[in-house]
Image (tube, helix red, strand yellow):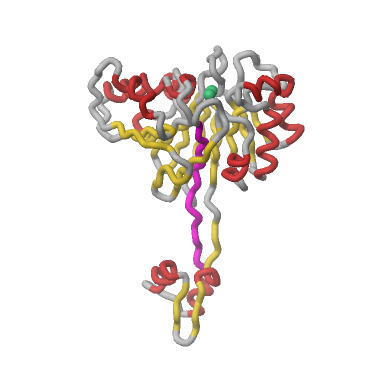
Amino acid sequence: MPERIKLTFLGTGGSIPTVERGLPAMSLEYNGAVYLFDCGEGTQMQMLKYGVNAHRIRAIFITHMHGDHVIGVAGLIRSMALYGRTEPLEIFVPEGEEGKLEPLLTFDRVRIGYPILIRKTRSGTAYKGKDFTVSAFALKHTVKTFGYRFKEDDRLHFDKQKCAKLGIKKEMFTEIQKKGKIRVGKKLILLSGVTTKEKGRSIVYATDSRPTASTINASKGADILAHEATYSKELAKLAKERAHSTSEEAAKVAKSAGVSLLVIFHVSARYSKSNPLEQEAKKVFKNTMLAYDGMELLL
Ligand SMILES: [Zn+2]
Ligand SMILES: [Zn+2]
């Protein structure tokens, strides 16, 4: 059985928090560790509220250095220091923007008793974990911004009967996996002939951004695309001006990429509980959910 992936939408508002929606952060739990995507103000409170263990955070992936996506780092790292954390913490920020993170870490000269490793996000592989990779892709916003894609490694399953019949045993499995083929007697056996591939799951996190081809490419066949939808289509002009997306635009991205589920978030503070965002998106892409704070998805 593959490891469970648990997503928790910790903050689903954009720019300004409301009583219903905190600022952007999504946690992804996998193999006993927590990976955080964005860390808006109040994220540590949301983690307490929704049962995500901060001590298990390995890495934080920041999309861009707008305050609503990163200010939460300041409080979170201090709380972990007070709790006696010793394990290193990696924080990814867009390359060239590291200087904007520094003040949040150092302004009060507090002693942080664990290493904080600042990593530069560029397009391509950002983080390689056990059985998965997180890669980054450029988004289109008012400042340098990256989306992130969590992709589990594909798994190979041997057809045991076939292997037995062909005489593949013991260390031969390692060899055929390494070389992609093996010679048994007079027969050349290809790896693809005796295995089936189970595709790893993938989750894409894309905010803040206009709809872009890079998001479509990164999301091809993804299980979940979490895409910003700051405005309803009525404010399409504003979305364009401020380099955000309407929910309809997010849905078009999801449709082009052929994802299984679209989750929209980063909702403008102007919208109350009853708003047209989900409905407008669903007209374009049926399998859409409007995220709410504390929403958990298991896959
Ligand atoms: Zn934002
Ligand atoms: Zn922004």
Residue 101 or residue 178, whichever sits in front = 101
Residue found at x 55% / y 23%? 12
Instruction: Please report the bounds of the magenta region as a residue range.
Output: 145-159
Direction from residue 43 to residue 202 in the image, left or right: right
Exactly how many numbered labels are in the figure? 0
Task: Report if residue 147 lies within the magenta region.
Answer: yes
In the image, farthest residue toward the bottom: 186
Direction from residue 67 to residue 233 in the image, left or right: right
Task: Report if residue 30 lies within the magenta region.
Answer: no
Residue found at x 61% / y 22%? 242
Residue 195 position within the rendered picture, expressed as x and y whole percent measured from the top left:
53, 67
Residue 220 position within the rendered picture, expressed as x and y whole percent measured from the top left:
61, 47
In the image, farthest residue toward the right: 283
Residue 117 position within the rendered picture, expressed as x and y whole percent measured from the top left:
31, 34
Quarter of the image where the C terminus is located: top right
Residue 297 or residue 81, whichever sits in front = 81
Among the 4 quarters of the image, the one containing residue 209: top right
Residue found at x 55% / y 25%? 142
Classified by dominant secondary structure, the portion drawn in magenta counts as strand
Residue 47 position within the rendered picture, expressed as x and y whole percent measured from the top left:
44, 24
Direction from residue 261 to residue 59 in the image, left or right: left
In the picture shown, does residue 93 fall above or below 203?
above
Among the 4 quarters of the image, the one containing residue 199: bottom right
